[in-house]
């Protein structure tokens, strides 16, 4: 039988842009999700150093936060981003994949509040953090 | 007595220098190329253009552009506009060396400290446009606001405010 994580993984991996960036959902709980994005030269923002562009990290953060909202028991349907703020703490190490973990820490009837952290292989020093608000939609 | 004024440069010379600088900024970054972004220039005013593509979709049911793509589009527009403004004086004076730029000698780019994106309506499967306004640009930090729209200039689909760390001039 397909688990909830399997279904969610298929859903995430069916999003054309997430698929194009090679995102893979590795964990999903009740209001939490972890998504991995492999290093890819086409996503480089600084050709001199090979560091990934912040925009690619934004795409990962947005997908991961949205997945956390959808995994929350109080959020029956889909979701859309209302706002998302990203802080870039340091450059990601070239060649390493980025892993984002999001937690949907509060849900009302209409709004879900989420925060997320992204790291490379040095998991003690986050690359970026994000906070956002997402819509809560009725079950389809 | 005033010093004799230098005659204005021929229009094609100055245009060539401006366009070469802009091209170096945009074509030098793999991720900008991956998104398929372009920039249109009128004098010193830049407009970021994101032609629609299937790989930019985030919600196949609607369909709508991925929120991450929208954020990236705004961030790239902010960074390019900021770099462009920072280089403008050197482009105009001719201090910038277009031959080095064309050979891939990309100028140092500002680094994003943080960026906050508001999603005002869903991004339709259409081309998108963005323009940035630099609200403050100091020696080290800059604050930039960016607006993005699709069919109607007055109906923004997203806006963002970001803070950036400016590249330090090599002494």
Image: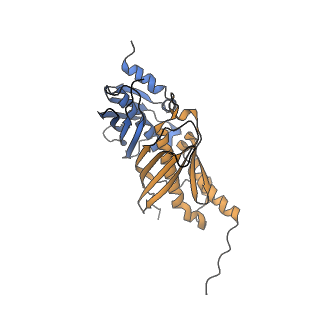
Chain colours: A blue, B orange
Q: Nearer the viewer, residue A117 or B116?
A: B116
Residue closest to the far top? A1
Where, quadrant-wise, is the C terminus of chain A in this rendering?
top left
Q: Is residue B4 above or below residue A25?
A: below
Position of residue B84 measured from the top left corner of the image (x, y, whole percent)? 54, 57
Find residue B166 and report its image quarter: bottom left
Which residue sits at x=55%, y=33%?
Answer: B55
| Left or right: B47, with B8 as reference point | left
Location of residue A4 by image quarter: top left
Say how many tags the image has.
0
> Of A53 and A103, which appears nearest the observer?
A103
**Left or right placement of residue B152 versus residue A72 in this view:** right
Residue depicted at x 60% and y 65% = B92
Residue B104, given in percent of the width and then of the height, sits at 58, 51
| Residue B41 seen in this snapshot | yes
Q: Image quadrant of residue B164?
A: bottom left
Q: Position of residue A27 (x, y in %)?
A: 35, 26
Q: Is B134 above or below relative to A121?
A: below
Q: Residue at x 42, y 51 (%)?
A: B162
Is residue A97 visible in the rendered image? The answer is no
Q: Residue furthest left?
A: A106
Q: Position of residue B57 (x, y in %)?
A: 52, 33
Please identify the quadrant where the N terminus of chain A is shown.
Answer: top left
């Amino acid at each position: 039988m397909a688990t909830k994580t399997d279904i969610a993984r298929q859903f995430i991996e069916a999003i054309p842009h997430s698929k194009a960036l090679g995102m893979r959902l590795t964990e999903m709980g009740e209001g939490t999700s972890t998504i991995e994005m492999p290093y890819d030269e086409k996503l480089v923002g600084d050709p001199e150093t090979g560091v990934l562009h912040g925009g690619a990290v934004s795409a990962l953060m947005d997908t991961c936060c949205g997945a956390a909202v959808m995994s929350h028991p109080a959020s029956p349907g889909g979701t859309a981003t209302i706002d998302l703020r990203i802080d870039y703490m340091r450059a990601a190490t070239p060649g390493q994949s980025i892993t984002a973990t999001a937690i949907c820490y509060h849900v009302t009837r209409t709004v879900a509040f989420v925060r997320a952290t992204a790291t490379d292989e040095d998991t003690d020093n986050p690359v970026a953090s994000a906070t956002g608000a997402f819509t809560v939609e009725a079950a389809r | 007595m005033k010093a004799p004024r230098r005659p204005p440069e021929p229009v094609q010379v100055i245009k060539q220098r401006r366009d070469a600088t802009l091209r170096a900024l945009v074509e030098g970054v793999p991720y900008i190329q991956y998104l398929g972004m372009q920039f249109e220039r009128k004098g010193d005013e830049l407009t970021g253009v994101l032609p629609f593509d299937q790989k930019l979709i985030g919600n196949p049911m609607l369909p709508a552009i991925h929120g991450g793509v929208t954020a990236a589009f705004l961030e790239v527009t902010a960074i390019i506009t900021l770099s462009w403004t920072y280089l403008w004086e050197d482009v105009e004076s001719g201090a910038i060396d277009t031959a080095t730029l064309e050979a891939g000698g990309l100028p140092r780019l500002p680094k994003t400290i943080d960026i906050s994106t508001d999603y005002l309506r869903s991004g339709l499967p259409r081309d998108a446009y963005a323009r940035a306004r630099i609200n403050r640009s100091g020696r080290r930090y800059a604050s930039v606001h960016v607006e993005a729209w699709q069919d109607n200039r007055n109906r923004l689909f997203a806006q963002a405010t970001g803070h950036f760390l400016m590249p330090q001039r090599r002494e």
